[in-house]
Image (cartoon, rainbow, N blue to C red):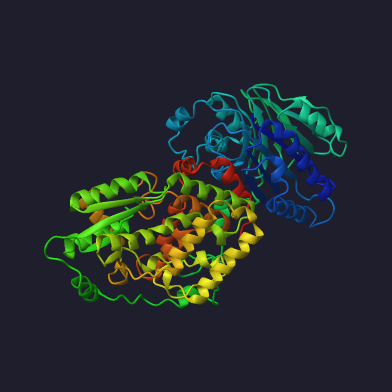
Amino acid sequence: MCGIFGFVLGRGTAFSKEAWEGWVRRLLTLSEPRGQEASGMVVAIGGHLEVLKRPLRPRDFVVTRQFAELTARTAARATEAGPELTHPLVVIGHSRLVTHGAEVLGENNQPVVAGDVIGVHNGIVTNVDTILERHPTIQPKGELDSEVLFRLVAEHGATGLAGAVAQTLTETEGTVSLACLQAGRELALATNVGSLHYAHDAQRSCLVFTSERYSLQQFLAAGSWLGRGPARQLAAGTGFHLDLATGVAEVFDQASPPAAPARPESEPGRPLVTEHTTAAQHHRLTRCTTCILPNTYPFITFDDAGRCNYCQAHEPPRLAGAEALESELARHRRTDGRPDCIVAFSGGRDSSYGLHLLVRELGMHPVAFSYDWGMVTGIARRNQARMCGKLGVEHILRAADIRSKRRYMRKNILAWLERPHLGMVPLFMAGDKYFYQVARQLRRELDIPLVVFCAGNPLERTDFKGGFAGVRESAHGQRLFAFSLQNKVQIGLFYGLQYLRNPAYFNESFVDSIGSFFETFVARDDFLYLYHYLPWDEETIQRTLCDEYDWEVAPHTDNTWRIGDGYTTFINHIYYTLAGFSEFDVFRSQQVRAGMLTRDQALSLAARDNLADLTVLQEFAAQVGLNLEEVLVRIEAAPRLY
């Protein structure tokens, strides 16, 4: 099962960055056979506790930039007053074998931060549901049984750490071997099965522990460890408590734990805990003081007040208006009941509401069409059926060679993983762009000149996608064909360079991708965009669809945007992980500029929207033929902009 380990260097110990970093690497390496799905550690010194965890095996974890930065910061704090430690230095680590909760989600990995308790656990808690029923105040953030364990320790924390651990173990069923810190002042080890081994040198105030005796013996045999003392097993039903302030340590029976150590009134308060997880790092991004765009957004700048250039340059959209729309529709409207327009219909909320408007309020007789390239969700199909059935609209479906399209996407994702670049993410969706071609074909086949796209909403502008390719997008009204010639050339050159730098892109999708570029940027787009004329109102759209059509929403979110696209959760996860924001942050920022939301509301909604649903990701991976965990681990390890 999982491997847990750690060590303590007492006050006054001579410190060497090379030695202590070597000990961490060595203990991680020795723990790797017990679990390779994720690695993590907490380092505590002088009122600072830093938590770093990644879904990487230990050998990969120790070569990350974040690991190097953490060890450098620790060394700086340890030596700021001289070569000897003025505060105890504590390291607790974990190598994970997944038993509960997918390791690709940071909240499912260890160490676990639960209030003022931080810990690692090896084993399986089998009565989690019972614990949660008895303690309704415990609200776990993830799926991890270990999180419930340490939140229970924190709940009992008033009795002192040893007492809290002992009380927790009396309520716990299953296997438990743990190490935890409370407020950076006390360390406790405990086990109900004997899977903890330690060596303690009371004179030098040094402690080291591992899950297995062999690992500990191998570590001690290397000869560089400062402490002295034999390897001992912590027997089942016992614990080890260390008061970091005084260095007093004792082994205790879990039936009679030691009392909480007395604390001086002048003792400093709770230490600073810094979590170096993706979610925690997002909170430390510099964001615009008006909207919520972060400093990782392409071409962003801030004035002295912290307001971004996008807010400074914002102007309300100039819509053509209802009269102009009616004038255009009147030229095509038929009174004999025959179809008079073709509507692109994805099954998403904008096209669903647009179809409602055209039939119920604008008196048109549309034919709806959908292009299925393998990423249309079941929800989208059911909503298409609901809308067309209730409105009496003919629905034409054009399907691509779905197996090939999904294979192309898989190969381009795997190519991207070889050399990740955020500017290349739109390549994954290249196969979707043939819906423009379908619109042109149907116009000829049905002899209906008017094609309506229920798009053009200025709130949905996502110019960061071109920005990551080095392109400052021109004003284009959310029509890719309307990009300036300079923009189109820049995009073509960027993609060409990336293909040369990464030959894996020269796969069987190449011709399909070239065709997508042509259909998007070259072939003429003279379609009518509904939201170039009418204002977009999220509340009205959602109320109309849900109340009048029983429109289905996704079970994983209250948000109704993008739920008709099978790939959206995946690409937003990439942007959110590597750039610290996604389409949702951009959308909410534009709502703030339009006066539809406050900044606090936008932050709250974006935080909710950005929680990737693992079920949706698994469905996408199954469709495309990807090993989801392998892909998400490689995304997690890719270079970030923050």
Q: From the viewer's perspective, is 253 left or right of 548?
A: right
Between 350 and 2, the one nearer to me in the picture: 350
Up/down of 61 relative to 432, above or below: above
Between 275 and 49, the one nearer to me in the picture: 275
Which residue is depicted at the point 64% across and 47% down? 51
Q: Position of residue 468 (x, y in %)?
A: 56, 65
Q: Position of residue 514 (x, y in %)?
A: 51, 61
Which residue is depicted at the point 54% across and 23% down? 173
Q: Position of residue 324 (x, y in %)?
A: 24, 76
Q: Position of residue 249 (x, y in %)?
A: 74, 33
Please identify the residue farthest to the right as the structure is shown. 223
Quadrant where the C terminus sits is: bottom right
Which residue is depicted at the point 29% across and 65% down? 451
Up/down of 109 relative to 511, above or below: above
Quadrant where the N terminus sits is: top right
Q: From the viewer's perspective, is 273 left or right of 87?
A: left
